[in-house]
Image (cartoon, rainbow, N blue to C red):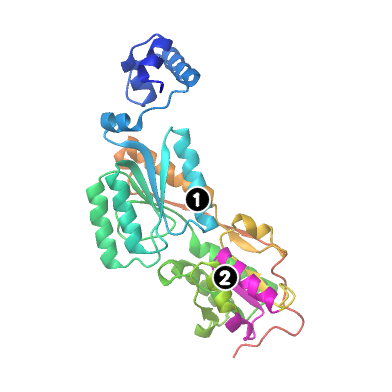
Amino acid sequence: MAVTLRDVARLAGVSPGAVSQVLNGKPHRISPETCEQIRQAAAQLRYVPNQNAVTLVTGQSQAMGVVIPDIRNLFFAELVSGVEAVALEAGWNIVITSSSDKSALALANFRTLAARDVGAILLVPASDADETLAMEYRQAIRDYGRPVVQVDRIIPDLGVSLTAIHQRRGAKLAMEHLLDLGHRRVACVLGPTNTCAPRLSGVQEACAQRGIALRERDLYPGAYTMESGYAVADAILEGDYTAVFCFNDMMAYGFYKRCRERGISIPHDLSVMGFDGVLFSDYLEKPLSTVWQPARQLGVEAARQAFRELECPEEAGKCTLLEPQLQIRESTVPPAAGAVCQET
């Protein structure tokens, strides 16, 4: 038989109401000693709260919903691990949905989580969001009426808190590193248009400050996937570049694979720069120079913001930007003698 709240109350020598107040985090005037007695009894009996009952009492489940674009992307896996750590510490669960980076599915996932009465939702928008979908999001957020925190990616004017990383500054650090090494002809593998704009802005700023021309033909389309990095590699390798800046590590992995197939040596023939700093980047044959984004901390801060808003709704609307860090490894070196191209 499942352990009930009454069983915990009997062992602790208190009323079931007192147990409910303490274990469900409701306001009470119970002494700290009695609270500890109740928690010890619950632990001894391995009591697990009935989530349906909690929902009936509190009007919301003790679960936090998370909408991410791609569950295969290691960056989002790290982000979710941070959310989970904060949620578990508070005695909450998390419910994860993946949108395959499609806004229509991301919005549907948001509405599904709202219908399940989760206590808060962390939203990483898909890359193809437009103004029409933004209007639908705004309505869905109003209908939901509970804390929503936008994470990593930005849909303007949603009227919710934002927790993100300073993308422009990170990309500028990466490009400055390549320019400092002596590279003057750098190919950039972009991400989806709606999400890579701050990174491209950082690259453009670094080039402008050094008087370096960044040409339209130096920009190659990508989709933040290994497949897209692999697909664009041949076109880049036919050019006269000495370095490549992939706008995320996953695309750099795909680019590495195609270089290996073609006998291109990294970094002897071509330096490669990534962005994200996910776990495997340090385990490649030539560890990848990259911009580390504190993805796990991003999830931690977003979850904490949601809990703050649950306690105090006036906390909504906050913007938190975390700082990226340059990680220089073996994939970037000065260009080989005579390989620096002249500007045209």
For label 2, the SS is strand
Q: Amino acid at mark 1?
A: Leu
**CA distance for labels 1 and 2:** 20 Å
The residue under the point 64% across, 71% down is 257
Locate residue 270: give its quadrant.
bottom right
* Mark 1, residue position: 79
Q: Which mark is residue 91?
A: none
Residue 152 painted magenta? no
Query: In which image quadrant can residue 11 be found?
Result: top left
Question: What are the residue bounds of the magenta stretch?
Answer: 234-262
- Which residue sits at x=46%, y=16%? 41
Q: Is residue 269 above or below residue 65?
A: below
**Magenta residue check for 251:** yes
Number of other residues with Cα within 10 Å of mark 2, as a class: few under 14, some 14 to 19, many 20 or more: many
At x 25%, y 53%, the residue is: 140
**For the point 37% across and 10% down, which residue is it?**
14
Horizontal side of 190 relative to 344 (left or right) equals left
Q: Is residue 222 visible?
A: yes
Say the numbered circle drawn on residue 246. Answer: 2
Query: In the rendered view of the protein, which quadrant contains the C terminus?
Result: bottom right
